[in-house]
Image: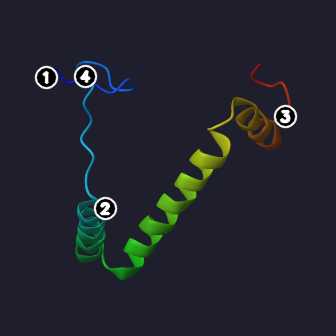
Amino acid sequence: MNRQEPPNKQKGEERFIASPGLTGALIAFVFSLLWMIFGFWKFLVILLLTIIGYYVGFRYFSDRESIKKLIDKILPPGMFR
């Protein structure tokens, strides 16, 4: 019998999907490595800046108009257009 590919998967487009346990272990390893290298307080600063960067990226860079509004709040409107 000939097996067909699922319709959403094209030829040559295979993605590696890690298990949730492996992903969690990798994240924990990176956090513990950063803690050992930089110490507790520097690690907290790195973690805080990462969370802020994720929030800004998710909130503002997902919509083109929202980034324009953010730039207009920071700089005078129409300065770079």
Q: Residue drawn 38% across and 72% down?
A: 43
Where is mark 3, residue-wise?
76
Three-letter code for the amino acid on which mark 4 is drawn: Gln
How far apart, in angstroms, are the residues tagged by discs 3 and 4?
A: 57 Å
Q: Name the residue under label 1.
A: 1
The image quadrant where one finds the C terminus is top right
**Is 67 on the left-hand or right-hand side of 58?**
right
Q: Is tag 3's residue or tag 4's residue first in the polypeptide sequence?
A: 4
Q: Is mark 3 on a helix, strand or loop?
A: loop
Q: Which quadrant holds residue 12?
A: top left
Residue 41: where, in percent of width, then height? 41, 79
Q: Which of marks 3 and 1 is nearer the N terminus?
A: 1
Proximity of marks 1 and 2: CB atoms separated by less than 8 Å: no
Residue topped by disc 2: 20
Q: In which quarter of the image is residue 69?
A: top right
Apparent side of residue 65 relative to residue 1 in the rendered image (left or right)? right
Residue lying farthest bottom?
40
Name which of mark 3 and mark 2 comes first in the sequence.
2
What is the number of the mark on residue 4? 4
Q: Measured along the vertical axis of the image, is residue 46 above or below residue 40? A: above
Q: Quarter of the image holding residue 33?
A: bottom left
Whether pointer 3 and pointer 2 mark residues with C-beta atoms closer than 8 Å, the reply is: no
